[in-house]
DNA sequence: ATGTACCAATCATCCTACAACTTTTAAAGG
DNA sequence: CCTTTAAAAGTTGTAGGATGATTGGTACAT
């Protein structure tokens, strides 16, 4: 049997090393990485090779280059960038269905694996939602609502689930924000949050899944309504 | 409000055009795309610019370059490639949970949207599974089993779901194949297939979801068992 | 203090050259 | 004629240099 030569290419080696440095937090998100010439010295490759590596990571969404200014770290997770790019081309309702699938499963896992800290965070989110409603602060309400759901998913302790969910929710809400007219009165079904919280707290998988389903049904109805305008 | 200049860069333009040509099927998977110099003429950019675009798509998993030979199309879906790369670094059991989430939702949607053709394909898969078991052909059984589940997901008619599911199942089974000893007798719980089929046929969302859950529980138990060896 | 012009840093694009590898072609030997 | 071998052509990989475009800061004049 002939084995493929498979000698790793220089460009991929450099890209992989940069990726690792980002994932390891050596260069943090938002930070500027050294200019091309320094990296050329650091990795001891030609400028072309280095640029191809950088470009691959830019396309993947990890980096962002700004002519004249430099290159900054845009994200530490390439899957999110791929999802974002993909979802832009997909129907919003399809994305909602997938989100439901992920959050439903996440809630069940959260009922198993949630920590005490998770519960505290969830309670705080509920409090913030209530406060935002009282002050008619829609922006803050949405932020707290998102944080609540993201905390549920994070409580699942499943990293793949978390990384898939975050960009999805982000995109759904940017969609929704565009659609939302500021004069539409918004209602807060606090019971759903409270009951989901209770289910997760008491390790009740089935109840948690059921409340996610109810919540998503409401959201879907709202979205469909908004899209009709 | 100041809007970002955001003038699209040449490299990204070229990458985007190539991506579109692949997605549109102008260059099919496995096919060789024209050599660099021809593409340089076609897109009217320098070789460096073209190479950076190609490299971005190679890193994303859409293309594969072979020095001395040429560049071939590796996949038509960049999300799948990103997922494959990601999942390699993730625990198998996490992937199983996400697969369960997706397939559960897919089964519910399939119960709504399945076509008559979908039902025929499902029946054929079940038949092939039964035949493979009779002939003790493990390879064929797995192939037919995978096809059954993929057909369920495709019946959901949700493209995002389909594109997320396919690479996931692929990876799970390559994992499982490595683990499976050929002498372990394999059992076929045909009832699960038949009952899931019946639920989808009769538009019974809840039953479909329940049978996916049962199936996944069995699979998870098998995987855990195998991993202990 | 403010606005303008200039300068330096940085990325974007282009060009040429050669190396490494693969495929095809042609030649040589049987 | 067929097989083996060697040369040639084709293709991607890497290197280095040159110029343009954009940004951010500095110094100067007002």
Image (cartoon, coloured by chain):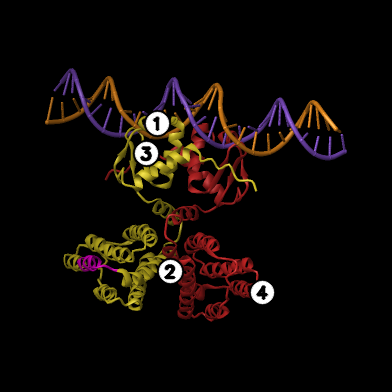
Chain colours: A yellow, B red, C orange, D purple
Which x, y percent locates residue B223? 48, 68
Ranked by sequence position, the earlier of labels 3 and 1 is 1
Secondary structure, mark 4, is: helix
Q: Nearer the viewer, residue A130 or A64?
A: A64
Percent from the top left, x then y, of residue A56?
Answer: 45, 42
Q: Pointer 4: what residue?
A: B131
Residue A229 has which mark? none
Residue of label 1: A40
Q: Position of residue A170 (x, y in %)?
A: 34, 58
As measured in the structure, the alpha-carbon distance from the residue carrying label 4 to the one carrying label 3 is 56 Å
Return the chain for callout 3.
A
The residue pinned by badge 3 equals: A65
Q: Left of B132 or right of it: where is A16? A: left
Q: Is residue A93 visible?
A: no
Q: Is residue B153 left or right of residue A221?
A: right
Q: Are marks 4 and 3 in contact (CB under 8 Å)?
A: no
Seen at 54% across and 69% down, the residue is B149
Front position among marks 2 and 3: 2
Depicted C16 relative to depicted A208: above or below: above
Residue B138, quarter of picture: bottom right
The crowding category of the residue bearing disc 4, from other C-alpha atoms within 10 Å (few below 14, some 14 to 19, many at least 20), is: some
């Amino acid at each position: 049997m002939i084995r493929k030569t498979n000698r790793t290419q220089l460009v991929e080696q450099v890209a992989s090393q940069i990726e690792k440095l980002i994932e390891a937090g050596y260069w943090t998100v938002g930070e500027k990485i050294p200019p091309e010439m320094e990296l050329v010295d650091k990795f001891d490759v030609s400028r072309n090779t280095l640029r191809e590596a950088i470009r691959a990571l830019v396309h993947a969404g990890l980096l962002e280059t700004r002519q004249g200014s430099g290159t900054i770290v845009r994200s530490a997770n390439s899957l999110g960038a791929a999802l974002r790019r993909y979802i832009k081309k997909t129907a919003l309702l399809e994305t909602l269905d997938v989100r439901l699938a992920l959050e439903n499963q996440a809630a069940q896992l959260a009922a198993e694996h949630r920590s005490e800290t998770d519960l505290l965070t969830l309670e705080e989110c509920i409090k913030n939602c209530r406060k935002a409603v009282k002050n008619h602060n829609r922006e803050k309400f949405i932020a707290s609502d998102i944080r609540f759901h993201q905390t549920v998913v994070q409580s699942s302790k499943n990293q793949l689930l978390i990384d898939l969910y975050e960009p999805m929710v982000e995109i759904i809400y940017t969609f929704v924000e565009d659609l939302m007219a500021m004069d539409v009165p918004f209602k807060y079904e606090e019971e759903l949050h409270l009951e989901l919280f209770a289910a997760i707290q008491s390790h009740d998988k089935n109840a948690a899944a059921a409340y996610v389903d109810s919540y998503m049904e409401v959201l879907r109805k709202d979205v469909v309504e908004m899209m009709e305008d």
